[in-house]
Image (cartoon, coloured by chain):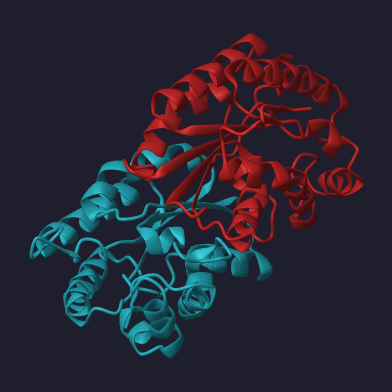
Chain colours: A red, B cyan
Amino acid sequence: MVTDLRVCFVGESYVAGVGDQKCLGWAGRIAVRAIAAGQPLNYYNLGIRRETSTELRARWEAECTPRLPQGVDGRVVISTGANDTGHENGLPRVDPDDSVANLAAILRGIAERGWQALVVAPPPNVDDEHNLRLSALDERFAELCDTAAVPYLRVHQPLRENPIWMREVALADGYHPGAAGYEEFANLLVPHWLLWLADPGSGLPVVR
Amino acid sequence: MVTDLRVCFVGESYVAGVGDQKCLGWAGRIAVRAIAAGQPLNYYNLGIRRETSTELRARWEAECTPRLPQGVDGRVVISTGANDTGHENGLPRVDPDDSVANLAAILRGIAERGWQALVVAPPPNVDDEHNLRLSALDERFAELCDTAAVPYLRVHQPLRENPIWMREVALADGYHPGAAGYEEFANLLVPHWLLWLADPGSGLPVVR
């Protein structure tokens, strides 16, 4: 099962791996694991710090298009929502209805281009109220992905109960862990990720 | 000397690290080395496989702008030319005059945005005739960077004489090494890179 796989990871600072001394984040780590498992791929990390899903919706296609040319097995992994649910002046930066509409639009666009999508839940941070908003959004993203028949990896709750993730986040800026935290994040994803790479149409809908 | 440094690496497959089992390439490796040396940074890898300098010229600004917001110390590292000098139907994909004009336009744009630029030479491959064209372009890029007062790291010749780089490239697809080759590439860059991060206006013009 070796094809010309090219994977774009789009989303926010967690995708970019902010805080990771190894400059891989969870995205780079799962890419390395796929290669080690015998599935070569081209790894394109397109995470942007502080970006909302509204901003992502406006740019994902322009950036993925030159990286996923005709004839390759093009994949897009999306993780967004942590910045949407951050408060600015007492309000979320993006209304949850808009976050869901943005993700839905991105998933429609990916399907129209003939690429395969995988969605990864936004991870938790040290702020309990922020995490409540994230949990609610996580629920809506799961429903959306279920309807769209796109796999959704629900790592928000497991990471909240992961002592390494939560300790590393607390020791840093309250949001971003170091290398060990990203390694925990990646470990949660790997089995589903490898299955999805091998067969995106397999029975891997919403992972609950 | 810790500032909010954000570095975009733009260019072709070597920038993206194609063939590197560790998913870092030379760009990720020098980013890791900077962090280990006490200079945190946000690492954005925007290399695209098979891209020419003409294509890079058309998209670099749209991709760097959201990643280098107002108020940060924005840096752009460019490495291009290997695809320009590749033959298609007996001719280079991009005429050398156009390659030089493209790089000049990108450097002007970076200066206009108030960002700092660093240019890295395109590395050699197994094709001697291709390498002759690359050497000629390397010479012209060095002159251009000298005139523009932008540092240019002349790694083309040292890599051609580097047995690890050349062996790894030959063992793979003739162009892209594995992790050990990218490590050699990164080792050549690190001293100049760290100096440039600390002080882009220091006496680091063209490295010959």
Task: Indicate left or right for B159 with A201 as reference.
Answer: left
Task: Indicate left or right for B12 with A185 as reference.
Answer: left
Q: Position of residue A156 (x, y in %)?
A: 79, 32
Q: Position of residue A121 (x, y in %)?
A: 70, 31
Pick whichever, B166 or B145, lies toward us.
B166
Q: Is A64 located above or below residue A82 in the figure?
A: below
Count the numbered circles shown: 0
When asked about the image quadrant of residue A24, the answer is bottom right
Residue shown at 42%/39% (left/top)? B65
Pick whichever, A137 or B62, lies toward us.
A137
Quarter of the image with the C terminus of chain A is: top right
Q: Position of residue B137 (x, y in %)?
A: 19, 71
Q: Is B14 located above or below residue A174 in the figure?
A: below
Residue shown at 69%/55% (left/top)? A20
Outermost top residue: A97
Can residue B113 be seen here? The reply is no
Q: Is B152 located above or below residue A106 in the figure?
A: below
Q: Is B67 located above or below residue A113 in the figure?
A: below
Residue shown at 39%/70% (left/top)? B176
Pick whichever, B131 or B56, lies toward us.
B131
When asked about the image quadrant of residue A112, the answer is top left
